[in-house]
Image (cartoon, grey):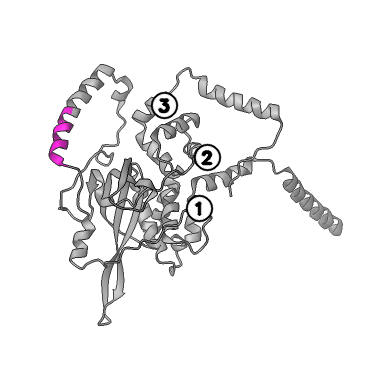
Amino acid sequence: MGYVAVKGGTEAIEASIDRLKYERLKGGEQVEVSAILSSMRLLIDQVMSEASLYSPELAALAIKQAEGSMEEAVFLLRAHRSTLPRLYYSETVEPERMAVERRISASFKDIPGGQLLGATHDYTHRLIDFSLLEEQEEERQQWLQQYEGELSALEDAAGDGTYPKVVEYLRNEGLFETFEPDNTEPDDVTKNVFQFPASRSERLQILTRGQTGAVTALGYASLRGYGQVHPTVGEVRVGYLPITVPAHGGEDGDDSYYIGSVRATEVESFVPMPTKGPDGKQELRFEIGYGICYGQNETKAIAMSILDQCLEHPESDAPSHDEEFVLLHVDTVESTGFISHLKMPHYVTFQSKLDSVRNTRKGRDGHES
């Protein structure tokens, strides 16, 4: 459910909206959408993921309109998304075809193709850089020109940017179970109301568009002991996935059109699971938790992979294994909408409760006297 309706005096509401605009403009400095696009890519990535709409320009506009509020920006972008026609259905995306910008493994020091650190804050000192207060345009352009020259040479040597998946080498050794491809049409939670028990496609959709903080918090809770799922990250990938649509409304195949690429983060986590072997002795096997989301948002994708594996084992009593608990509480618009509706008028219900308390006290005081 979503609480968006507001009732009240028209003049008061219009005055409130005018005051909102005044608060945005009164500082005298305006952030252009182009500035948000060029300098707030990680915020844009989060908004696009939680809104289920890949459009950096519209996400930047929503951020400006929402004055930087994540929840409001996601709400705006989802509302706009609901008005758009769905013209095509893309063909199945193969993650192996990702043009990789960043690729690391916490499970192995050496992986086929090598570790690719890419752009990340992981290796920074996390100290405030006061030099950013006085950035000069000339120095910025000079640094960019020099770095882009070096980058161009590296990209020429890197080829098409695709890399093999780490897990495939483990499968070839028989260390991971191999499954037949499941070509069942995925469920779409944006067009149909899902019911419990949810399918895995529904669970993954809800997690990837879930609020980053909520997904991270529940993944962290599982790590701390509420489920005790402690994986090792097999591979984190950040890069661009090619999107194609079948020609003339046909089926997946060679006759298709490339319509563009989307930047995404993909995670495969290896989760140790104790089990009994054929001889009845205790042995260890691994399962895979999967996470993927728009843009570069590695923490969310890793937490998603934890929750994905948790929800595959509903027999556990931990809350992170309860799909109703997880799936109904990570959605950005649902959770913030329900909390925010408490600001709306509740005069009738509260007065009724007050009358009940007063009558109870009158009756008790009269009995005591």
Q: Is residue 106 left or right of residue 228?
A: left
> Which residues are the magenta region?
149-159
For discs 1 and 2, the disc positioned in front in the rendered view:
2
Q: Where is residue 335 in the image (x, y as percent from the top left)?
A: 53, 48
For residue 329, which numbered disc appears in the image?
Answer: 1
The answer to which of marks 1 and 2 sits earlier in the sequence is 2
Q: Is residue 102 left or right of residue 23?
A: left
Q: In this view, does 138 lie to the left or right of 67?
A: left
Q: Which of 203 and 106 is in front in this view?
A: 203
Q: Position of residue 132 (x, y in %)?
A: 31, 24
Which residue has dot 2 on it? 83
- Whole-angstrom CA distance, mark 1 to mark 2, is 25 Å
- Whole-angstrom CA distance, mark 1 to mark 3, is 31 Å
User: Is residue 224 among the parts visible in the rendering?
Assistant: no
Q: Which of 107 and 357 is in front in this view?
A: 107
**Amino acid under label 1?**
His
Which residue has dot 3 on it? 33
Vertical placement of residue 184 versus 283, above or below: above
By secondary structure, the bulk of the magenta-drawn segment is best described as helix
- Helix, strand or loop at mark 3: helix
Marks 1 and 2 in Cβ contact (< 8 Å): no
